[in-house]
Amino acid sequence: MNDAEMDAVFQALAHAGRRRMLDLIRGMPGCNVNDVCKYFDSSRIAVMKHLRVLEEADLVISRKAGRSRQLYFNAVPIQLIYDRWTTEYSQFWASQVTDLKFQIEQPVNKRANRE
Amino acid sequence: MNDAEMDAVFQALAHAGRRRMLDLIRGMPGCNVNDVCKYFDSSRIAVMKHLRVLEEADLVISRKAGRSRQLYFNAVPIQLIYDRWTTEYSQFWASQVTDLKFQIEQPVNKRANRE
DNA sequence: CATTCATGTAACAAACAGGTTACCTATTTG
DNA sequence: CAAATAGGTAACCTGTTTGTTACATGAATG
């Protein structure tokens, strides 16, 4: 997964409404745009734009079925990010490292810094 | 972690340059702004703005040391997201579910859909 | 103490995000 | 077929992002 694709996935996830849409679509695979719209106050067009963002990030896959569009959640991009980050940043996910104390409690104190 | 905080973390990660800055800071904890700038073509101000985004997402912590600012990577937000998503979306991370075949190869076929 | 160094602020510009309304297209279905 | 239904496009508006240059501040240092 290259930078642009990763950008797209994180960007897509950087919106609570879109994350909720992912929830919904995962929970009712094959649902259509209007089904999703029922759960949101904003206009259908706004929802469609969000769905497009999710689809361009490959987090949602859709297939036309008559006049309707069936929506499916796709976990692959999230898995790819997980795989990459667990190898490249393996400490990120190791719980002892995430304890803030291990991160910052002993500052580097490069030169002077007397207080 | 609430929606807004999660938004901030994903938004911060949705930029290849910022992800690279995280790499750098994780690799040289306690480095300062100029150290980071050396690795980027854009202006120092641009880098500073990115660092601010990372800091507001709590992915970077900084402490003033004289005229310099020491930067530290903080994995806590990523861990929190991981924890939440592994419980809330546990299938996301289970490898067999991420195989696209399991997701979409047998469409729902709600009503007619003859081809 | 004057200068350099590291950082920070202000003001601006271009591009993008996220939303709207109005209108159009295609498919069911009575 | 007429009308309702599901979806899609176009144009527009507003606020945010992402970058710039110019200037200011505060700490080290010769």
Image (cartoon, coloured by chain):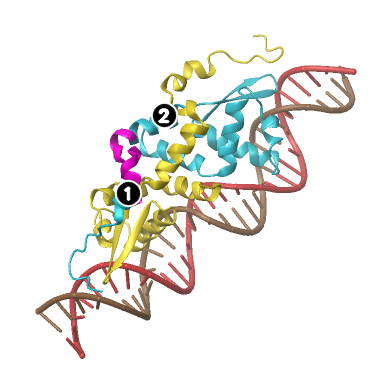
Chain colours: A yellow, B cyan, C brown, D red
Q: In which quarter of the image is the C terminus of chain B?
A: bottom left
The residue that appears at 72% across and 35% down in the rendered structure is B38
Q: Where is residue B54 in the image (x, y as percent from the top left)?
A: 54, 35
**With B73 as the anchor, is A29 left or right in this view?**
left
Above or below, comparing residue B20 to residue C11 in the picture: above
Magenta span has B87?
A: yes
Above or below, comparing residue A39 to residue B114 in the picture: above
**With B37 as the anchor, is A39 left or right in this view?**
left
Q: Dominant secondary structure of the magenta stretch? A: helix
Q: Position of residue A70 (x, y in %)?
A: 28, 61
Viewer-closest of A42 and B115? B115
Farthest-out residue, top: A115
For mark 2, give the secondary structure: helix
Above or below, comparing residue B28 to residue B97 in the picture: above
Q: Where does label 2 land, which residue?
A: B79
Chain letter of mark 1 equals A
Q: Where does label 1 land, which residue?
A: A22
Q: Position of residue A43 (x, y in %)?
A: 32, 61
Start-end of magenta stretch: B86-100
The residue that appears at 39% across and 34% down in the rendered structure is B81
